[in-house]
Image (tube, helix red, strand yellow):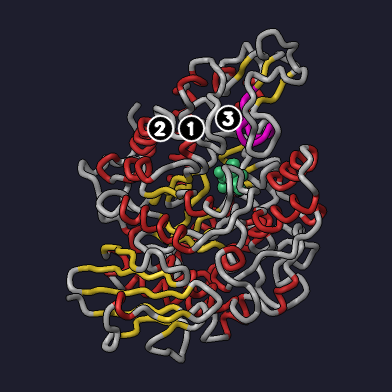
Amino acid sequence: MTTDHPALAPTSRPDGWWRSAVVYQIYPRSFQDTDGDGIGDIPGITSRLDYLAELGVDVLWLSPVYRSPQVDNGYDISDYQDVDPLFGTLADLDELIAATHARGMKLVMDLVVNHTSDQHAWFTESRDPASAKRDWYYWRPAREGHEPGTPGAEPDDSRAAFAPSAWTYDPASGEYYLGIFSPGQPDLNWENEDVRHAVHRMMRWWVDRGVDGFRMDVINLISKPAALTSGGPIPAGAGGFGAIANGPRLDEFLAEMNREVGLDAEHLITVGEMPGATVEVARRVTDPARRELNMVFTFEHVNLDQASHSKWDLADLPLPVLKANLAHWQEGLADAGWNSLYLDNHDQPRAVSRFGDDSPEHRVSSAKTLATVLHLHKGTPYVYQGEEFGMTNAPLTRIEHYQDVESLNYHTLATAGGTPEEEVLASLAAKSRDHARTPVQWDATDNAGFTTGTPWFAVNPDHTEINAEAARRDPDSVFAHFQRLIRLRHDSETVREGRFALLLPDHEQIWAFTRTLEDERLLVVANCSSRPAELPLQELGELDDAELVLGTHADRDPGRLAAWESRVLRVRTL
Ligand code: TEU
């Protein structure tokens, strides 16, 4: 199939503009409400664009605002070409796109095409076994020798991410459909080329409407394992998405999408979310010569503080392990491909509470230092709403405090399986996605300036101290620090392109590395602990004539770092 889109340059572009960009993620439901229904909306985003321009970010990524029954807060889409009335109208979105562009920023849409909602017209049609769309999803008979619809008759034993089984029984046709997230999110069959073409057409429609790219939800799950696509069960695997991710046709599907939609067009940016992707997969997919994606989100570093493939199985995370993982990705994508950099997003607890220290004494320094470390790596940094002024986890202590489908499902299954309630609640308090979804704390007023109505999720009570307005007034705030980091990336070629080298890999407190480009070298030293740390000057070299580029503390001891102090220094290259 050919497209009527502008011809693509015949050579790859290793020099995309997005290499100097910082992306800001908006979770619309929790960002800013304007109509008083307690749920954030698109006009609310438009009303805060000046704030985002002041922060200095280049690109906004919107979590889904499409029509959706909201089983998974919009990651279950029933119409890809309309806006859910919860969030506004298509006209509101057009206005947001124009207002974003008017401020020199770009706007990226979330693309959720591994699955649709079970309310999508494609799936409604597919329920009829005689329909041409039957093959657009994965339908299977009951397990041999079992009565369809009875316990244990599912085609295989795979669990869904947010439900007990990956298979849901449809009594009308007597068969099961696949939904690896939840029954409300049936998986599309990408082996069917009509599915692929329908997705490409929809993407072109958005590009023509003016969006600047896509963040692609679980895009490495679109190509399913051969055992499944040839009619068999999901192969039993290592748990998580290991058994089902990175299927044999992934590169083919991504290259085809790139070609058909024209994703290599100069102004667009693409980032693929890829649970279970290794450095090798990421390198292949983001190698510009292959023309698939610009960058991918890895999960490796956010899966380190768990003892098994389950995120709820809590484990300590020693600093050397985290450093080594990021360094592994820096090295793996040093010559080809590109990294995305994140600690926070809508699926993760708040970074300052998880990797930092959110006590009143250390919150500001640890939020700044985590940001320093992340933003001084090579790649495209992502800022998640509220991270820029150090929002923390919420005090969620009872199951009634939670809303997320993943958290609620875990609670039901784990307690039914005999895990003590306190243990389940401890896991949720550490890892629930709900921590990221509390309303943005704009100011110290009752609902934090988020809504005049009743907020859909309780505002974190710490908003009286921690809010955007207070941070903007304070030149030493986390917000001011993010502004400096973003400016530094825009101004410094070394931050963008410099070679990365990890120092002191085994140090339990200090995260240290260099970035070198030609004769400029930046040294980052960051104390990622709540105790002071001696600087091992013998290993780091003499820092006497190093020039401070950016730091978290005004008083600096040449021989030691205060708790959660970080410095970016320009040092001599020998
Ligand atoms: O997330 C994919 C994904 O791997 C997560 O669901 C992960 O399993 C979970 O968050 C771990 O806590 C994407 C979206 O980011 C997420 O919000 C959606 O729920 C999911 O896909 C399904 O669309």
Q: Main secondary structure of the magenta part?
A: loop
Alpha carbon distance from label 2 to label 3: 15 Å
Identified by mark 1, the residue type is Ile
Residue at 41% x, 71% y: name it.
486
The image quadrant that residue 246 belongs to is top left
Q: Residue 202: percent from the left, percent from the top?
A: 49, 37
Residues drawn in magenta: 177-187
Q: Mark 3: which amino acid?
A: Asp
Q: Are marks 2 and 1 in contact (CB under 8 Å)?
A: yes
In the image, is residue 301 part of the stretch drawn in magenta?
no
* Mark number displayed over residue 250: 2
Per the rendering, the mark at residue 187 is 3
Dot 3, how many residues are within 10 Å of its Cα: few (below 14), some (14-19), or many (20+)? many
Which residue, given by chain and number where applicable, does mark 1 sit on? 222
Nearer the N terminus, badge 2 or badge 3? 3
| Type of the residue with mark 2 | Leu
Residue 515 vs residue 274: left or right? left
Q: Is residue 561 among the parts visible in the rendering?
A: yes
Query: Which secondary structure, mark 1?
Result: loop
* Magenta-span inclusion, residue 180: yes
**Spatial CA span between label 2 and label 1:** 7 Å
- Where is 371 relative to 211, above or below? below
Residue 492: x %, y % from top left: 30, 72
